[in-house]
């Protein structure tokens, strides 16, 4: 089991939801309207006058074999337009209840 | 949920809400009446008091002064003027425009009641009269006839007037110059004396033989009959055969022996001619609140029907029809509105290059405009010049908000986002600033609704309409526009190869629009960025050059090239000419001059379609007579010319030709040739020099001196003195002792005189349901010289007769003129109309050249009044308004930027708008009038919008961490298109207004010219002055901010590393 944290421009919400549905990922936690700033370029998403855009984020815990497929889709989504931006990070899930 | 989100999520509801708005709007539009101006009550109240027997100066002291003193405390009083003539005192109150007249009348009534106790005993009760729109004629027709002229009165009264009375909303219909049928018994004085008879005896015989009287009932066996004496005259010829008396010799004396009976039309006292033919003028007014256009249209239709029933020689011709002017003005303005709409849409298409986007933007215009009609419907107003002008102003502005929203959504969509989500999030990013810019406009237009006076009435509606329209457009921009974007905009096409990888689009493939317009716009961006870069590195030079340009643009003002007017005169194809001959000229002589003038006018101005001339006075005072003061020595003409586009010479040239002609007639004392303008409150255009002072001779002399001096000024025409010349009267002074010895009194003598000269009313001749006066009087030869008057026979108490000269002295004497007062002081006014110059310049010339030459004794003063005074009042109102608007706009901007300095930078663009206005006025040769001044005030709001766009973006770039100059250049480059676009939409929206040449266009042209000039110049200069000033002013401030921040967190002891631009 791995945890995948996907953070994306809120304008991509529908696409991310579509992606999760299509990949058969049922469970996730959705954080609407989160702020963030990228390390390697890209516009900050702060919801201010200066940086008006906002992100949303999803954490989903998936089986190990699904991770690469998921990250692949995320990459394709990112390729659609770099400016809109989507990032995914994974880490191990030690224990669950 | 935010409004834009709900709108996008519920497209059907959103669309239908707007459909409903459109439907209600169209419904209101169809029911809106058409009028020239918003409803305004003329704020005049007149109090008329009669005091029989009092002379003008007695009237002044005993009545007028008392009334004036009482009435000065009426609320909202602006001016109090009065006229005191023999027997009559008229006090006129002019209140502030827009005051509640019902309240004012009540107020006046209570003051009059209070003052009534102090009036002399024989005074009549003062009559309060409110001037209302219903008492002003809306159209006049002339009715001419040849053979049937004598019977015209009957035709008109029995057929024409009753039919017209059926029309909805029609008010008073009066006839001027209609030939009344009269039966005159003209007695020969000598024959009367020879038979020892008096005129009154003849009169009594005529009256006594003309009656129907019931004389009781006769009862017979079964029946009962009413008995009646029926001996009314059936024909006028019966009068001739009446017997008056018997001579001592037993000879019968019949009326035919001493008099001639004439069944004819009334003696000439008022003469009406149209194109030289006998005519009757039909004057039509409407009821208060009725719609002028509607009533006039119905009158036209009805008259066309009536014409068919009339004898063939009777012709009905229009003298003027005020609805025509209104209709034409409205039509040409409506055309302007439609052109403005088209231009704005074209500008949007040009800049955006996409038809879908253009539709989305374009749709906001009709919706916003239609809401204006709903407002007009709710406010019970009308489609008028002001409301349509407001719409034209608004058209260019309503698209701005929608453009901002659409641009941001397009940017998101082009990044590859889904239109639906892009619409939500992109709107979210800009909606607050869209509302903020609208607030700036509201700050400009809402204060307009607070103006007072006549300008207040005119601009109240404008203020509300533009506010309503702009707010609607904002609402549309954050609801309908995102909704339409989510539906209509197409997401960028995605191409995927067989492996599922994205394929890049071919970037070199460009369509026609991208190859031409975009390339050109790119070049403009490039050039601008470059020049801006140069300016930023040479700030001092740039500022000095711009300042120099500003100062240079003011030179036309210092050179006196920009005049001021109250309102532009309009060429409505109608002239009114008034001619005054020597006082006391008899009507027949006046008519000769009138005929000569008519003939010459037609010769000089072949364009003339119709001349209606009236001369003389009508003794039955109708309401219409209030508006046309004709006297024996006065001729007034209304001249109708073709519409201005149907002739080559303009009306002012023609008026000047007529004036020059009239100047050559030695018998003409004074003449005036007015261009009838349909402006509010009469629409005259005069400078009035008022001379206050008590002594008549002194003020008359001063007035004459002024008249000569003013006439010598190059631009002054129609210079007239308000005070009438002294009138020659025949004064009869009764020797009371002699009179009483003969059993006569002054009262009986005056009655006898009246009977002999004016005639004794002796009942009526009834014919076909109408009654015609029978008048017994002396023959004309017996009463048309002073010696004739002295020779009049007066019956004494003993039955004998004496000559008037035996009991009274008859002399010629000059009756004092009407005493005019204003502000409780005697006044004489000299009026002058500007020609080829402006009102302001003429007033200035009078002030500087004429007034100093007057040798005013102590207690005498002068004042410049008239339209010039109104203009000055309005201009000072406007300046105050401009100050208020600047302050409000500053407040809105300061709160938007959270800075006190940045709005100040933007405010620097306002003076450049002024330069643009001056240049535009100078180039077009126009003067600044009330409407132009309004444009100037509006400019404050319009030009700062450009500045806001720029400063806002520079701020953003600075906050995103760009270097100052870089941020400025970057912003300039990215914002030049939106700035140009909004400026172009507003400017092109005004173009149809500025170039329109339809009827009444003179009035709103200045608005178009002022806004176009001001906005064009200020837009181009804003593009340099704002960035440069931003550069100059913000350097220090920004650096301080960094320092402060460091001081705040000094305890963290983080050493400054090589900080990159992105923090």
Image (tube, helix red, strand yellow):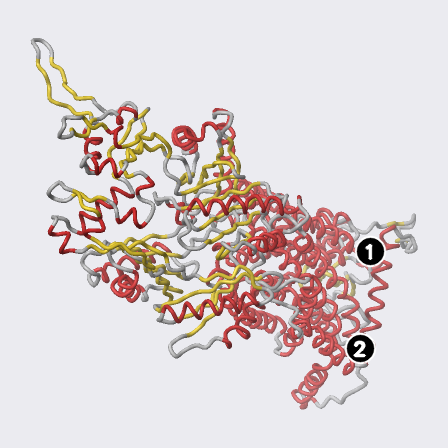
Few, some or many residues within 10 Å of mark 2 (<14, 14–19, 20+): some
Question: Which dot marks residue B290?
Answer: none
Q: Is residue B1040 left or right of residue B842?
A: right
Q: Is residue B1011 left or right of residue B891?
A: right
Which element is circle 2 on? helix
- Rendered residue at 29%/43% (across/down): B758
- Image position, residue B189 (x, y; %): 26, 39
Q: Which residue is mark 2?
A: B535
- Image position, residue B1033 (x, y; %): 70, 82
Query: Which quarter of the figure is the C terminus of chain B placed in?
Result: bottom right
- Image position, residue B216 (x, y; %): 11, 21
Question: Which dot marks residue A73?
Answer: 1
- Image position, residue B331 (x, y; %): 61, 44
Query: Which quarter of the figure is the N terminus of chain B placed in?
Result: bottom right
Which element is circle 1 on? helix
Chain bearing tag 1 is A
* Whether residue B975 is situated above or below residue B405 in the rendered picture: below
Few, some or many residues within 10 Å of mark 1 (<14, 14–19, 20+): some
Q: Is residue A32 visible?
A: no
- Rendered residue at 15%/55% (across/down): B736
Frontmost residue, B560 versus B915: B560
């Amino acid at each position: 089991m791995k945890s995948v944290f996907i953070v994306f421009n809120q304008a991509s919400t529908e696409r991310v939801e579509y992606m999760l549905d299509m990949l058969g990922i049922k469970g996730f936690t959705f954080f609407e309207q989160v702020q963030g700033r990228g390390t390697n370029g890209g516009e900050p998403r702060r919801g201010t006058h200066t940086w008006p855009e906002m992100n949303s984020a999803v954490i989903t815990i998936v089986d190990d074999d699904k991770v690469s497929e998921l990250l692949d889709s995320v990459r394709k989504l990112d390729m659609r337009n770099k400016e809109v931006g989507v990032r995914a990070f994974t880490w191990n899930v030690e224990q669950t209840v | 949920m935010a409004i834009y989100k709900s709108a996008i999520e519920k497209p059907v509801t959103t669309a239908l809400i707007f459909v409903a708005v459109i439907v209600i709007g169209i419904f209101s539009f169809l029911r809106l009446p058409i009028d020239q101006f918003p409803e305004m009550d003329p704020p005049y109240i007149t109090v008329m008091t009669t005091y029989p027997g009092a002379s003008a100066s007695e009237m002044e002291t005993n009545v007028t002064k008392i009334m004036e003193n009482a009435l000065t405390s009426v609320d909202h009083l602006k001016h109090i003027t009065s006229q005191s003539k023999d027997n009559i005192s008229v006090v006129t109150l002019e209140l502030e425009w827009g005051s509640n007249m019902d309240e004012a009348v009540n107020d006046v009534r209570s003051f009059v009641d209070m003052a009534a106790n102090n009036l002399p005993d024989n005074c009549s009760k003062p009559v309060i009269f409110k001037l209302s729109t219903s008492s002003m004629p809306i159209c006049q027709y002339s009715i001419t006839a040849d053979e049937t002229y004598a019977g015209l009165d009957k035709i008109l009264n029995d057929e024409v007037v009753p039919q017209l009375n059926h029309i909805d909303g029609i008010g008073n219909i009066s006839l001027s110059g209609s030939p009344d049928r009269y039966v005159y018994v003209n007695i020969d004085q000598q024959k009367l004396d020879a038979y020892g008879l008096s005129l009154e005896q003849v009169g009594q015989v005529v009256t006594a033989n003309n009656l129907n009287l019931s004389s009781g009932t006769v009862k017979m066996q079964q029946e009962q009959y009413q008995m009646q004496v029926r001996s009314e005259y059936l024909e006028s010829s019966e009068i001739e055969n009446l017997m008056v008396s018997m001579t001592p010799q037993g000879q019968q004396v019949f009326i035919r022996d001493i008099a001639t009976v004439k069944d004819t039309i009334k003696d000439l006292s008022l003469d009406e001619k149209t194109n030289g033919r006998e005519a009757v003028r039909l004057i039509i007014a409407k009821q208060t609140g009725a719609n002028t256009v509607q009533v006039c249209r119905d009158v036209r239709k009805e008259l066309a029907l009536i014409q068919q029933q009339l004898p063939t020689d009777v012709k009905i011709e229009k003298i003027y029809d005020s609805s025509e002017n209104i209709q034409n003005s409205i039509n040409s303005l409506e055309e302007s509105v439609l052109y403005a709409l088209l231009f704005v849409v074209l500008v949007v298409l040009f800049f955006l290059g996409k038809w879908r986007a253009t539709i989305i933007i374009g749709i906001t215009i009709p919706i916003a405009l239609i809401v204006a009609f709903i407002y007009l419907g709710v406010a019970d107003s009308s489609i008028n010049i002001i409301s349509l002008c407001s719409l034209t102003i608004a058209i260019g502005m309503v698209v701005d908000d929608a453009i901002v929203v659409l641009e941001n959504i397009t940017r998101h969509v082009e990044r590859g986002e889904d239109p639906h989500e892009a619409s939500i999030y992109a709107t979210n990013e800009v909606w607050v600033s869209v509302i903020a810019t609208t607030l700036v406009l509201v700050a400009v237009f809402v204060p307009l609704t607070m103006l007072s006076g006549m300008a207040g009435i005119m601009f109240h509606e404008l203020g509300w309409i533009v506010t309503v329209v702009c707010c609607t457009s904002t609402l549309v921009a954050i609801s309908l526009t995102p909704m339409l974007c989510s539906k209509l905009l197409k997401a960028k096409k995605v191409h995927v190869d067989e492996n599922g990888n994205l394929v890049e689009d071919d970037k070199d493939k460009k369509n026609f629009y991208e190859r031409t317009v975009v390339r050109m716009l790119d070049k403009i961006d490039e050039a601008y960025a470059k020049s801006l870069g140069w300016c930023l590195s040479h700030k001092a030079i740039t500022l000095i050059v711009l300042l120099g340009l500003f100062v240079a643009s003011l030179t036309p003002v210092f050179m006196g090239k920009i005049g001021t007017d109250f309102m532009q005169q309009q060429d409505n194809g109608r002239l009114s000419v008034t001619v005054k001959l020597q006082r006391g000229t008899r009507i027949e002589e006046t008519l000769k001059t009138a005929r000569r003038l008519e003939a010459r006018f037609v010769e000089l101005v072949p364009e003339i379609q119709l001349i209606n001339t009236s001369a003389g006075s009508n003794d039955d005072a109708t309401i219409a007579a209030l508006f046309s003061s004709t006297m024996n020595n006065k001729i007034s003409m209304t001249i109708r010319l073709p519409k201005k586009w149907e002739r080559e010479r303009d009306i002012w040239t023609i008026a000047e030709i007529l004036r020059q002609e009239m100047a050559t007639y030695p018998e003409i004392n004074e003449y005036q040739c007015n261009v009838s303008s349909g402006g509010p409150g009469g629409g005259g255009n005069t400078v009035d020099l008022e001379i206050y002072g008590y002594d008549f001779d002194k003020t008359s002399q001063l007035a004459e001196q002024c008249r000569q001096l003013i006439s010598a000024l190059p631009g002054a025409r129609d210079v007239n003195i308000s005070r009438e010349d002294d009138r020659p009267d025949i004064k009869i002074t009764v020797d009371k002792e002699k009179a009483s010895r003969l059993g006569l009194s002054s009262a009986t003598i005056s009655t006898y005189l009246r009977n002999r000269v004016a005639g004794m009313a002796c009942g009526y001749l009834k014919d076909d349901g109408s009654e015609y006066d029978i008048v017994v009087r002396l023959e004309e030869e017996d009463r048309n010289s002073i010696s004739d008057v002295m020779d009049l026979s007066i019956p004494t108490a003993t039955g004998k007769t004496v000559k008037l000269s035996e009991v009274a002295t008859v002399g010629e004497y000059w009756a004092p003129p009407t005493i005019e007062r204003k502000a409780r002081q005697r006044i004489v006014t000299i009026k002058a109309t500007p020609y080829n110059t402006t009102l302001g310049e003429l007033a200035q010339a009078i002030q500087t050249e004429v007034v100093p030459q007057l040798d005013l004794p102590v207690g005498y003063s002068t004042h410049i009044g008239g339209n010039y005074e109104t203009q000055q009042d309005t201009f000072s109102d406007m300046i105050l308004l401009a100050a208020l608007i600047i302050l409000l706009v500053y407040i809105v901007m300061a709160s938007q930027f959270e800075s006190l300095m940045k709005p100040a930078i933007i405010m620097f663009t306002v003076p450049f708008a002024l330069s643009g206005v001056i240049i535009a006025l100078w180039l077009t040769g126009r003067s600044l009038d009330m409407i132009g001044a309004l444009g100037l005030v509006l400019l404050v709001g319009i030009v700062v919008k450009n500045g806001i766009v720029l400063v806002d973006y520079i701020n953003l770039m600075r906050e995103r961490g760009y270097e100052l100059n870089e941020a400025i250049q970057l912003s300039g480059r990215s914002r030049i298109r939106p700035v140009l676009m909004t400026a172009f939409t507003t400017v092109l929206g005004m173009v149809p207004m500025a170039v329109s040449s339809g009827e009444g266009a003179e009035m709103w042209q200045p608005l178009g010219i002022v806004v176009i000039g001001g906005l064009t110049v200020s837009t181009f200069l804003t593009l340099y002055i704002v960035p440069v000033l931003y550069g100059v002013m913000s350097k220090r401030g920004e650096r301080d901010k960094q320092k402060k921040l460091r001081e705040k967190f000094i305890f963290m002891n983080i050493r400054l590393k090589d900080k990159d631009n992105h923090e």
